[in-house]
Amino acid sequence: MSSSSIAVVLGLGALAHTAMAGGLTFWAFLVATRRKTAPYRVAVALPVLGLLAGLLGLCLTVQGLLSAFGAVAYADASERSSLLADGIANAMNATAFGIGASVLLFAASAAVSAWGSRRPRA
């Protein structure tokens, strides 16, 4: 893949992530204005936190990969593979954190909003 196609894929992924957060925030806002209780007002912030967690995971992944390849550049030949493996492992852990936190926060917002969207019992 060329660098321009990678940039397009990353841009589309960021756009989809932002659209998901925006849609969930709007839905939670509609539920919160109708229900006017604390749990539904908290649901408005959850997608925004999910978006921030995903962006933090992305930034930590990039930083981890940069430090891994930077350490390899100045290391002895016997230590390179170990340093590279540790750096990539740290970067993938950051990716897992970002994706996991985003999914959990998006799911929590959707669950609270779905619960608040139900019709009251008669």
Image (tube, rainbow, N blue to C red):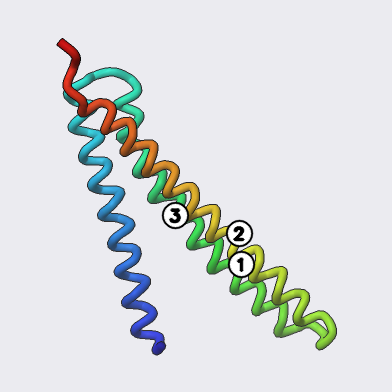
Corner quadrant of residue 122? top left
Q: Which residue is mark 1?
A: 64
Residue drawn 26% across the image and 32% down it? 114
Element marked by disc 1: helix
Please state which amino acid type lies under the numbered disc 1.
Gly
Position above or below: 64 against 51: below
> Mark 1, residues whose alpha carbon is within 10 Å: few (<14), some, or many (≥20)?
many
Element marked by disc 3: helix
Q: Earlier in the sequence, mark 2 or mark 3?
A: 3
Element marked by disc 2: helix
Residue drawn 21% across the image and 25% down it? 118
Left or right of 55 in this view: 13: left
> Mark 3, residues whose alpha carbon is within 10 Å: few (<14), some, or many (≥20)?
many
Q: Which residue is mark 3?
A: 54
Q: Which residue is mark 2?
A: 93
The reply to whether discs 2 and 3 touch (Cβ–Cβ < 8 Å) is no
| Discs 1/2, front | 2
The reply to whether discs 1 and 2 touch (Cβ–Cβ < 8 Å) is yes
User: Foreground: 105 or 83?
Assistant: 105
Corner quadrant of residue 10? bottom left
Q: Position of residue 87 (x, y in %)?
A: 67, 70
